[in-house]
Amino acid sequence: MFLYDWGFKRDMCMLQMLEILKGWLTPLIAIIAIYIAWQQWKINKQKLDLERYERRLHVYKEVIGFLSLMPNSKNVSIYELPKFRAAVAEADFLFGPEIPKYIDEICSHWRELWVFQQEYRDITQEIPEGYNHQEKVEGIKSHSTWLANQIVSDFAKEKFKKYLYIGK
């Protein structure tokens, strides 16, 4: 009889354990589902960060490429400006206000340089009335120097650094 009681108690204990485990099963599944959702959220955030980085890097490369055009030619082409503007159009949405302002500043110097180069006259050309040769030379030098220094002195790199730095 004692062994029968022991078997009955053991079976009852197992049934109780199964009931307890069934009660814990739903919360356990919920915790696992939350963990999986959190992992997916982290992966999607990292993917978004990577895509944003790649788009920012594209804008930076366009800026450097545009600035690199200037020192290689005596005459700056005004036709490069709209191409550049189109290439960096999304900068307003990817960066803080300082980068679009910096791009505007680059375009302004580029445009001014082009104007000075168009107005410049050398000894072989007819000199218009009121022409100030020294003003044109200084304007060309000033804007050329500013544009060249953006790469040579790493000013452009410093402007973009906080948006492209990937170290922790």
Image: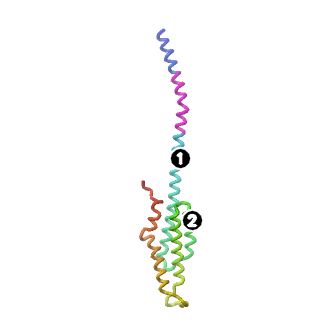
Indicate whether 28 appears above or below 147: above
Residue at 42% x, 53% y is: 168
Q: Where does label 2 land, which residue?
A: 89
> Magenta residues?
15-33
Q: Please tell me how crowded label 1 is: few (under 14), some (14-19), or many (20+) other residues with Cα within 10 Å.
A: few
Disc 1 on helix, strand or loop?
A: helix
Q: Where does label 1 land, which residue?
A: 41
Amino acid type, label 1: Trp
Q: Position of residue 49 (x, y in %)?
A: 51, 54
Q: Identify which residue, 20 or 69, lies in the foreground.
A: 20
Instruction: State which tag comes first along the sequence, 1 or 2.
Output: 1
Look at the image and say whether residue 38 sits in the magenta stretch. Answer: no
Disc 2 on helix, strand or loop?
A: loop
Indicate whether 80 appears above or below 60: below
CA gap, disc 1 and disc 2: 29 Å
Residue at 49% x, 65% y is: 61
Q: Please tell me how crowded label 2 is: few (under 14), some (14-19), or many (20+) other residues with Cα within 10 Å.
A: some
Q: Position of residue 104 (x, y in %)?
A: 53, 69
Indicate whether 96 appears above or below 10: below
Look at the image and say whether residue 24 sits in the magenta stretch. Answer: yes
